[in-house]
Amino acid sequence: MAFRFSPSYWRIVLGLCCMFTLVHTALSTPPEDPVRCVSGNTDCSVTNSYGVFPDRSTCRAANVAYPTTEAELVSIVAAATKARRKMRVTTRYSHSIPKLACTDGTNGLFISTKFLNHTVQADAGAMTLTVESGVTLRQLITEAAKVGLALPYAPYWWGLTVGGMLGTGAHGSSLWGKGSAVHDYVTEIKIVSPGSVNDGFAKVRVLSESTTPVEFNAAKVSLGVLGVISQVTFGLQPMFKRSLKYVMKNDLDFDDQVLTLGEKHEFADFVWLPSQGKVVYRMDDRVAVNTPGNGLCDFLPFRSQPSAALAIIRSSEEKQEIFRDATGKCAEATLISSTLFSTSYGLTNNGIAFTGYPVIGSQNRMMTSGSCLDSLQDGLTTACAWDSRIKGEFYHQTCFSIPLTQVKSFITDIKSLVKIDQKSLCGLELYNGILMRYVTASPAYLGKDTEAIDFDLTYYRAKDPLTPRLYEDFIEEIEQIALFKYNALPHWGKNRNVAFDGVIKKYKNAPAFLRVKESYDPDGLFSSEWTDQILGIKGNATIVKDGCALEGLCICSEDAHCAPTKGYMCRPGKVYKEARVCTRVGDINA
């Protein structure tokens, strides 16, 4: 008989891990370069920061190039164009979950922006900052702060690069100003694309709203298919401070509060804990730069973590999956969410200790974090929690935007699922619940098309792709409700394959984007099988085979797409009957 630790044991271990994280100051091992080569810069493969693409395939290329200047970049693109080689851009940390970094076949070229990481010009008078595309978000906001400027909105993880953020439409949370998307604060983009013989096989274009509006709106969210972004100029704002507090309430009137909180608080967001019937409100507002306070956001899950503790937590969840221990998952989820809330998610009033709300600090210290990247080698004693070299977090992420006018109905649908089984979404709460952020309509052709709420769901992924999850069907149904009932737009840099099937039809400006793509790269040298699929050019993103629905590679249409030998069959949804989900037949949630 398998030995099984008691739930109380795991709660103690998790509590100790959380407390260790709060006081942990050791430097962790930094992430690896996502490109690995057999010999020098030849015979290479690329992965994402989590170590596995959604379809678990391996992406290869003959070579990788690491340009350090724009001149070197132009030369690299020209040589590859002349040789008619496929190219794709990779970034320093490769945080896009789908296969955006992959090129076709094995004879292509990866172009890494790892060393295109310099500030080109800071102009405090004009309130602009020009940087190379490999600059990280952290570098960007730090350089802006040096001249008294601030980027008003940004993602919460600072390990993204400027080119990566423009490639995928990365955003923070706000309905104010131009909205929360980073690309809508860009004033100029310099991009290197394939050229003709007369161009020397590479063409450098400078794009802006005033001179080339059509091309500019295509390049602001480009998926990397227009070429390599070389430099980006941001229009920034004078430095300001933020005043932030978190408030936890029950979720009884949550669906109404969502519609109004974004108008009341500039940087509002939500962490919804549906199985607990709770929601954490972020009350976050801009205040004058001379307001007293030196607060700092150092989000706990983004800090370096002890690898041994991460292994214990992962083993705990694996055992819960094996034994179908929903009660254990819910107990640990409650512990984790309460610990994060009680420790203010890592906020401090002075960079050292949390002494109470509100926490007031400069924009560059409050908007984003990721201190597990601030690291020297410690032999993987500590690491970012998702580092694939250790036994740590391994998960799916489903992320989509629901129009604000339909959010209330969508929340009602999720609550209806929870009513069927209160424990069904505890698995989400183990990963800090459902993060909800505000986004607005963007002129970018592949950007958001209306005011919306972005829902971010993170949940357990098995190491074995043919192993179903506890409450598999509930999360699959939420995914399908969003994508098909509410026509949600998926985040380009997250999600499983099913989110991208036919997605380009949801974008009214897609034809304009594709015309620019054809003009810039008529031979599709910067395109790949994956980008052709999601742009509707050739094929589709779904992969139909036995077990394909378990990992979101397909929507099941027959039992074989689930795990029939383990009791999981393809069945209609419980709330959204049009859904087709993998349900454990004969189980309490069947």
Image (cartoon, grey):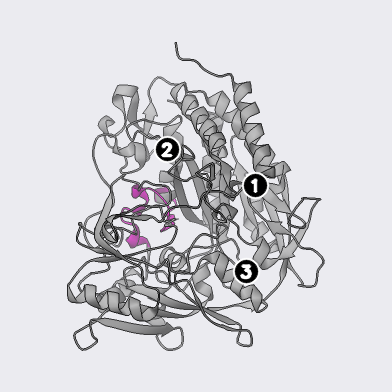
- Give the residue type that dot 1 points to: Phe
What's drawn in magenta, residue-wise?
484-506
Question: How far apart are the alpha carbons under marks 3 and 1?
Answer: 21 Å
Which callout, 3 or 1, points at the residue further toward the start of the chain? Answer: 3
Image mark for residue 461: 2
Q: Are marks 2 and 1 in contact (CB under 8 Å)?
A: no
Task: Tell me if I can see residue 421 in this picture.
Answer: yes
Residue 581 rendering spot, x and y as whole percentages: 37, 35
Secondary structure beneath dot 3 equals loop
Secondary structure beneath dot 1 equals helix
Residue 215 rendering spot, x and y as whole percentages: 37, 80
Q: Which residue is mark 3?
A: 176
Q: Is residue 233 left or right of residue 363?
A: left
Which callout, 2 or 1, points at the residue further toward the start of the chain? Answer: 1
Q: Is residue 156 left or right of residue 50?
A: right
- Give the residue type that dot 2 points to: Arg
Q: Nearer the viewer, residue 343 or 445?
A: 343
Q: Is residue 556 left or right of residue 441?
A: left
Question: How far apart are the alpha carbons under marks 2 and 1?
Answer: 29 Å
In this view, 86 is above or below 122: above
Q: Which residue is mark 1?
A: 254
Residue 244 rendering spot, x and y as whole percentages: 73, 58
In this view, 287 is above or below 420: below
What residue lies at 21% left-to-right and 89% top-to-bottom? 198
Label 2: how many residues lie within 10 Å, few (<14), some (14-19) or many (20+)? some
Question: How far apart are the alpha carbons under marks 2 and 3?
Answer: 36 Å
What residue lies at 64% left-to-right and 88% top-to-bottom? 125
Is label 2 or label 3 in front? 2
Label 3: how many residues lie within 10 Å, few (<14), some (14-19) or many (20+)? some
Q: Quadrant of residue 342?
A: top right
